[in-house]
Amino acid sequence: MEEFATSVLESSAGGVVFAAMVGLAVFVFGYSLSLILDGFSDPLKKRVTRLAAQHADSAAKRRAERVAKVLKPLAAYVLPKKEWEKSQTQRKLVNAGYRTSQALTIFYTCRVGLLLLLPLGVVLVSRLVPDWTRQDILIYLAVAGFVGLILPGYVLDRLVEKRQKALRAAFPDALDLLVVCVESGLGLAQAIQRVARELEVSHKELAEELTLVSVETRAGVERADALKNFADRTGLEDIRGLVALLVQTMRFGTSVADALRVYSEEFRDKRMQAAEELAAKIGTKMIFPLVLCLFPSFFLVAIGPAVLRMMDGFGMMAR
């Protein structure tokens, strides 16, 4: 009897401990989840996070300026002599979001550095690998030099593509907000400033560009020139069309709200046509995966048993 009572007490104590541990785990999980949700919904924390990101961006810009100051004596040796090449690279850098005057020098310094360092690395590695022949070393040197020459341009193109993709994804929302703001009675400058403020969190890249348009306008730049600069910085045809429409509207004095409404409807039709075009291409693009992946397994399952039976039949006939 005493042993039974002792076992009951031990089991009940173990159950209490287990229940306490489960309750503690549930409490910690719920508290952590509440902190995470509070971090997402608290405007103060959002503002602090935004200010911290801005501080980090300014610190990165200061570091880039210091690097460019150090590399300034090399600018005469690394920069191209042809103006068209400079302007083309400068436009790509601006489209990628690098608008400082030192960006061109840093880019070409990186290109020349890679062009020299990668072959030097091949030479150092060849000392550690005695099996390489002279011909192998020459081939690797040529490959390393080619990679060092094209790698900065390739990375820059990918950065431009990534930023333009983000701007293209944010443009429909910005256009709808701009139509709403103008139709509610705001002027074009105030509407652009309001849209930039609304897009600060969801679409940071486009918000920065619209803020720069507003800053240029307040600084005394003509509104048409500020909008054209906006189109040149982004490099998107959709934004170029919007800027051309706004400039024409301001030149002839027509209603900005009506023009934006018409352009918004045309842009929706264009997006729908682009989506239909992508959907129409799916059938052609699916041919190669079907032929390479699905059809071999289908023929194996459908014809494989018949082939095995035929092989067995021929084997019996041969006997």
Image: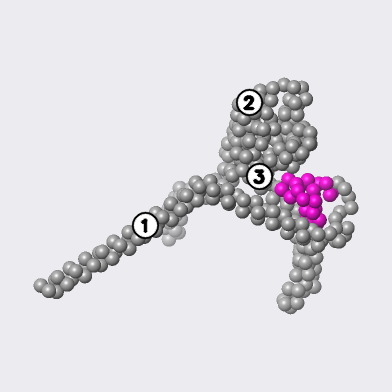
Q: Up-down: is 68 above or below 157? A: below
How far from the left and from the top, in percent, is residue 87? 83, 46
Q: State which region is magenta.
A: 85-108
**How far apart are the two marked residues, 2 and 3, measured between alpha carbons?**
26 Å
Compared with residue 157, is residue 69 higher up or lower down, i.e. above or below?
below
Assign a secondary structure to mark 2.
Answer: loop
Residue at position x 62%, y 30% in the image: 181
In the rendered image, the quadrant that contains the C terminus is bottom left
Structural crowding at the residue carrying mark 2, measured as other residues with C-alpha within 10 Å and reported as few (<14), some (14–19) or many (≥20): few
Q: Which residue is mark 1?
A: 27
Q: Amino acid at mark 3?
A: Glu
Given this view, does label 2 or label 3 mark the residue nearer the observer?
A: 2
Whole-percent x, y for residue 81 in the image: 89, 53
**Amino acid type for the residue under numbered disc 1:** Phe
Disc 3 target residue: 205
Give how far across and how far down residue 39 sits, in percent.
50, 51
93 with respect to 42 (left or right): right
Residue 185: which numbered mark, if any?
2
Would you say residue 58 is visible in this rendering? yes
Q: Residues within 10 Å of mark 3 (few under 14, many from 20)?
A: many
Which element is circle 3 on? helix
Q: Indicate yes or no whether the magenta region holds residue 23.
A: no
Foreground mark, 2 or 1, reads 2
Neighbour tally class for label 1: few under 14, some 14-19, many 20 plus, Cα within 10 Å: few
Magenta run includes residue 87: yes
